[in-house]
Image: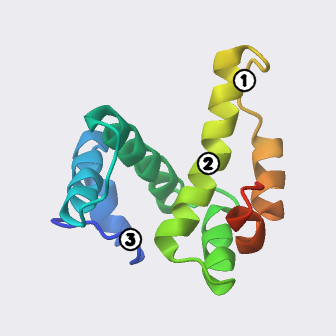
Amino acid sequence: MKYYNPDKPLNISEWLVLDDAQRKILVYNFHESIGAEFQDDGALTMHSYMHVVVENQIAANVDLVSETVTKLVRQGLSRHEALHAISAIIVEDIFDMLKGSKSEFCLKKYRRKLEKITAKRWRKGQY
């Protein structure tokens, strides 16, 4: 795999041949190529890794992730925006763990949030 475009479905077999560092570089390079603005290199790196997390879940066929991307795209988001919406759900849980409000990632809660999210809710900042 030479290029990554979050608006195109993955070639899963090509994606899975890469390690996470290589995947992050592809995502990072995509965002640089479109002139995406980030506060600093660390923010772009973290953003890129969140793409990798969601794309890895899609490639691994994690329950509801692909379906949620499809649903959000059908509702008017770009695939790229749909990946951001799912990333936001994950980041929210990670942030709660860092604050100490919860001790572990809850897959059941994650699934509920994936079921609940819509393009309309995402645009309102509700996920």
* Residue kind at label 3, given as amino acid type: Leu
Residue 82 higher or lower than 95, as above or below: below
Report the residue marked by disc 2. Answer: 88
- Measure the C-alpha gap from mark 1 to mark 3: 29 Å
- Please say which color scheme the image uses: rainbow
- Measure the C-alpha gap from mark 2 to mark 1: 17 Å
21 relative to 100 in the view: left or right: left
Query: How far across and down, in percent of the image, does residue 30 sit?
Result: 25, 62
Image depth: mark 3 or mark 2 in front: 2
Q: Helix, strand or loop at disc 3?
A: loop
Identified at 53% across, 61% down, the residue is 83
14 relative to 108 in the view: left or right: left
* Residue kind at label 1, given as amino acid type: Glu
In-front residue for pair 102/1: 102
Residue 68 higher or lower than 17, as above or below: below
Identified at 76% across, 54% down, the residue is 127
Report the residue marked by disc 1. Answer: 104
The answer to which image quadrant residue 106 occupies is top right
Number of marks in the rendered image: 3
* Residue kind at label 2, given as amino acid type: Ala
- Measure the C-alpha gap from mark 3 to mark 2: 20 Å
In-front residue for pair 12/104: 104
Report the residue marked by disc 3. Answer: 10
Image depth: mark 2 or mark 1 in front: 2
Query: How far across and down, in percent of the image, does residue 123 sit?
Result: 68, 66
Identified at 47% across, 61% down, the residue is 59
Earlier residue among tags 3 and 2: 3
